[in-house]
Amino acid sequence: MKRIALFLVLIPILLGACTSMYQKGQNQFASGEYQVAINTFSKVLEKEPENKQANFYVAESYRLTNRVEEAQQYYEKVVASEESYETFFRLGQSLKGQGEYEKAAEVFEKAKGLTLDDKNLQIVDLEIANLKKIGEIQNYWEFMQVENYKLLNTPLAEYSPVVNDGLLYFTSNRQSSGMYLATGTPYLKMFRTRAEGIKVDVQSVQQLPEFRNEENLNQGSMAVSPDGNTLVYARGNSTSTKDLPDVQLFVSYFRGGGYTQPIWMPVNEDEFYTNTTPAFSPEGNELYFSSLRPDGKGGLDLYKATKLANGDFGNAVNMGNQINTPGNEMFPYLAPDGKLFFASDGHAGFGKLDLFVAEKTEKGWEVTNLGPNINSVADDFGIFFSKYPTDGFLSSNREGGLGDDDIYFFEDKTPKPKIVNVFLNVTTKEKKDDGTEVILPQTRVVLYDGANKNVGGDFSNQNGRLRFTLAPNANFSIIASKSGYFSKSITYSTVGKTPRTEDLIQEVTNITLDTTVVLDALILERSIVLENIYYDLDKADIRADAALELDKLVKILKDNPSIRIELSSHADARATDEYNDALTQRRAESAVAYLVSQGIDASRLVAKGYGKRQLIIENAQTEEEHQTNRRTEFKVIEIKE
């Protein structure tokens, strides 16, 4: 991976005389020409395969060019002849970088036994603890899928995608003439092409047309301000002795149709600090970047700088030890909702760099690995969302790529929920005097949901039919009304009337249900008998069974708030007029009192005891005939407009 970073190297004192080839390789290593040094020391190893110093230099050269997984066989040769914390620790990192977790844990334990340095112990303990957590890592997004953008990538490196205003910017060493001797690959330059979301115009890729990429140095990861007028990028690895020794952040402004001459940024603070992988906040007033500084936690740490009054960025602050580790934290991306995405090899991950998200909580930052559907055992880094949080790009040198770092796109493939449409056919009818039911057309029917919110309404057609679309597993109420009829409400539930989601096969399933609402004619002064209203002998108290029947009248009154009724009680002919009049009046008043207790306004009710003056069956003989006369009725005496 051609990312620009520094790592501390502990070089043991070499023992014995060196051949000219060995001395040449040593000089190349000291000059940072690691790939050249690998080639030179490989020739030494052809003659002396067990040469400890040559194996060490090859291993370190691979590690310093971020190819630690290729260093394993060379570190093994070194520890075979001389055991030390440094070489065992590096061997453990090499094994971890290949997914050999159990072997890595064993080697880290050996490294732990070879040091008393508190800092070394802290670092190796973290590695061991992280290995134990690998099995606990879950997908942050369950249905996110990652795919290599093969038409965009080449066998060389493409990484650090940035999307801005319909353009995709990225870093690559394609179309480069100079050779970076540390890696043996061409120098990096900045490119761009058109893009719409994750759809990239691979035919229009070009070096930044308004910016002059410099030769013989690396132009690394870049950040583009939200307005597109400021370009911040990592620049370094120059072969010139007059240039800056380390990787630094430079800024260029778009003015008059092109970018200005790059300027060294004050946020670098010191020419001997490494500063790289910049990113703007969504508003552009903060700059996040990775840096190796004396106040850091060990390796590269994430810092945040704020925009000053003069337009520069300054007052860089370390993001703290909840985010930063003794390892390396790089490639920040601040999402619109404040979540910080970044790459790290210091938090629990699958091998080398993994992608993480840090979320603000009451206890500070909580860091989560994005999981195995995003990360791999290789380097995964440089995430950027084209549409947050459902799709975007990331960088990786995982197996299956085109040869080096590649750009991948990802998108949320959450399955579309299977839809259940519930259609309810409502039929409106009226009840005739003989008990039959016939179609009642042009009846107003209104549907309410469980929160009593109106969710539909219409008139039934000439066939007394209309249809509603209901939600599955929900409760509703239906009110039917028509002039000259009692309004009526019924409850309706779709709970348990549709298939379970897990049983659905088709994308859309239609369920048709039926219900009928029957209305009664509303005629002034027409008496309606309330069935099953019974009282104990010589008493007017409302019994439980009578209350159930009176509740039906409560519902009628609530469904028809404009009516006023007379509630009457009648006796049979087997007692005196005075007795029956008094008893039926008490019973009528008791029934009215019950209705009032259920929320009916007393002004809508009139209690009337008729005694035995309105017998239905004169000269009743049987108990059944007496019961017919001993009844409770109501009639509508007024309809308010």
Image (cartoon, rainbow, N blue to C red):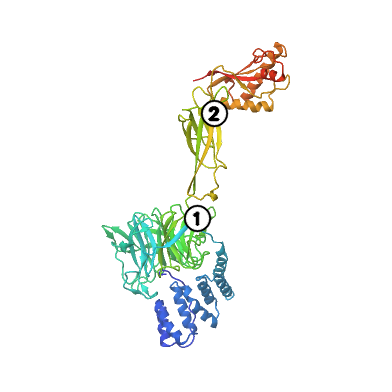
Q: Residues within 10 Å of mark 2 (few under 14, many from 20)?
A: some
Q: Quadrant of the N terminus?
A: bottom left
Q: Residue at x 54, y 50 (%)?
A: 503
Q: Tell me the residue that label 1 is attached to.
A: 359
Kindly tell me whether residue 67 is visible in this rendering: yes
Residue 266 vs residue 448, the one in the foreground: 448
Q: With 54 as the anchor, is 209 left or right in this view?
A: left
Q: With 186 as the anchor, is 341 left or right in this view?
A: right
Residue 412 vs residue 471, the one in the foreground: 471
Q: Position of residue 528 (x, y in %)?
A: 59, 20
Amino acid type shown at disc 1: Glu
Q: Tell me the residue that label 2 is attached to.
A: 518
Which is in the foreground here, disc 1 or disc 2? 2
Q: Position of residue 488 (x, y in %)?
A: 54, 28
Amino acid type shown at disc 2: Val
Name above or below for residue 531 compared with residue 513: above
Residue 468 vs residue 568, the one in the foreground: 468
